[in-house]
Image: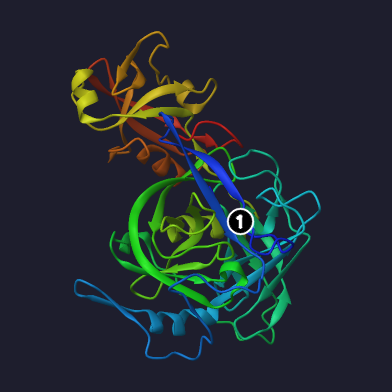
Amino acid sequence: MSGARLPLSALVAVLVLAIALVACGGEQGSTTITQTDADAPETTTDSGATNGDPEAGGEGSAIGTGSEVFDASAVYADSAPGVVTILSVFPSGGDALGGGGAGQGSGFVLNDEGEIATNAHVIASGEQTGGSGELEPARQVYIQFADRNQVPAEIIGFDPFADVALLKVDPEGLDLQPLELGSQADVEVGQPVAALGSPFGQQGSLSTGIVSADDRSIDSLTDFQIDGALQTDASINPGNSGGPLIGPEGTVIGINQQINTTSGGNEGVGFALPIDLAERSIDELRADGSVSYAYLGVSTNELYPQLAEELELPSETGAIVAEVVPGSPADEAGLRAGESGDRITFQGLPIRTGGDVITAVDGEEIVAASDLPRIVSRLDPGEEITLDVLRGGDTEQVDVTLAERPDSGQSG
């Protein structure tokens, strides 16, 4: 995963992280990503951003998309009072981006009880993004509100798989302005959105754009990927990781997390965690202080229509099982990968043949290989599922009891 926190000791330095985006165990491609947390520097905000008094309002800008009009000024006036800046003090050993000292990110108020959502990498220290090392919470965390109040916060817990953290402040004496949460079901590609936060430490900043895609796979703070992430061209820069992505209805549809960049700054390819995934994480953090995910134990390749024709398969969609982890639920259920010696080259990519092709989970169709880990990640350890599997030209049903996801391993 990625985003970017700027360490307080390095005013506008952006830590660039190289990650490999893997399509559920298929072939790999590399991209460069930055996490978005920053210091509070003496610098300007990103172009096209609004920075100022959340109560000020103004004539504002309206973005038209078909029959919809997105009033960015109204979004800012309604949402900015609930957006916070987060200051984290880390042990000298380093933060989740590999740096040390102190760092800054963004977050938003969840309720009147003083709960605040942000990214785990804003308040956690340890291995860099994509690693499987142990993460430790910051020594101290402070919350700066839009009305200039600054108070200490308690870390309730954090989820490195989804890169989500839950914080809590004492609400007494604070004018908390919770933001309303939306749903990924209401998100459509092309919809206007607004990203709020503190890029480069510039508090109360807003930038606008659209939802560019709603099904991206991005890296996390673990070996597993986050599937179903939202892509946006709303400007996300170091410092606004953890801030809200606001949709057309004025509700939070995602948590700003990462940017894909070659320069270290925003290039119009940002990513946000869908709020549905964040809510699941927040609910478990609130109850237990940690989050557990289900685990199947396979890596897969994409099944393209042309590949299905070449393999003489009766289905053009599904996930080709490329590897089964020994001792995993998939292994115990008898799922089969292709033999290492049985390979073909499809459009330059080596593909194992003869293995199972997973076409559905509990009746939900697997269209792309990334659908498999996305569906499994919604389930709980110990849950039993039924897989529709193409095996030797026939469709079989395989029952699998899911385990708890380990710190590292295949994404399915």
The amino acid at mark 1 is Val
Instruction: In this rendered view, identify the residue nearer to me: 113 or 96.
Output: 96
The image's colour scheme reads rainbow
Q: In percent of the image, x 20 and y 26: which residue is there? A: 306
Residue most extreme to the top: 341
Nearer-the-camera pick, 156 or 252: 252
Q: Tell me which residue sits at (65%, 66%) in the image.
A: 167
Q: Residue 158 vs residue 249: left or right?
A: right
Considering the numbered disc 1 on the image, is that residue within a helix, a strand or a loop? Answer: loop
Give the number of callouts: 1
- Nearer to us in this view, 46 or 21: 46
Residue 117's x, y, as percent? 57, 65
Quadrant of res 193: bottom left
On the rendered structure, is 95 left or right of 374?
Answer: right
Residue 253 visible to an observer of this rendering: yes
Image quarter for residue 174?
Answer: bottom right
Q: Nearer the viewer, residue 270 or 295?
A: 270
Crowdedness near tag 1: few (<14), some (14–19) or many (≥20) residues, C-alpha within 10 Å: many
The relative height of residue 362 versus residue 88 in the rendered view (above or below) is above
Q: Is residue 132 left or right of residue 54?
A: right
In the image as oriented, which residue stretches furthest toward the right?
Answer: 92
Q: Position of residue 84 (x, y in %)?
A: 59, 74
For residue 143, above or below residue 157: below
Q: Quadrant of the C terminus?
A: top left
Q: How far across and down, in percent of the image, does residue 331 sit?
A: 47, 21
> Can I make out residue 162 in this image?
no
Q: Which residue is mark 1?
A: 14
Which x, y percent locates residue 287? Answer: 61, 58
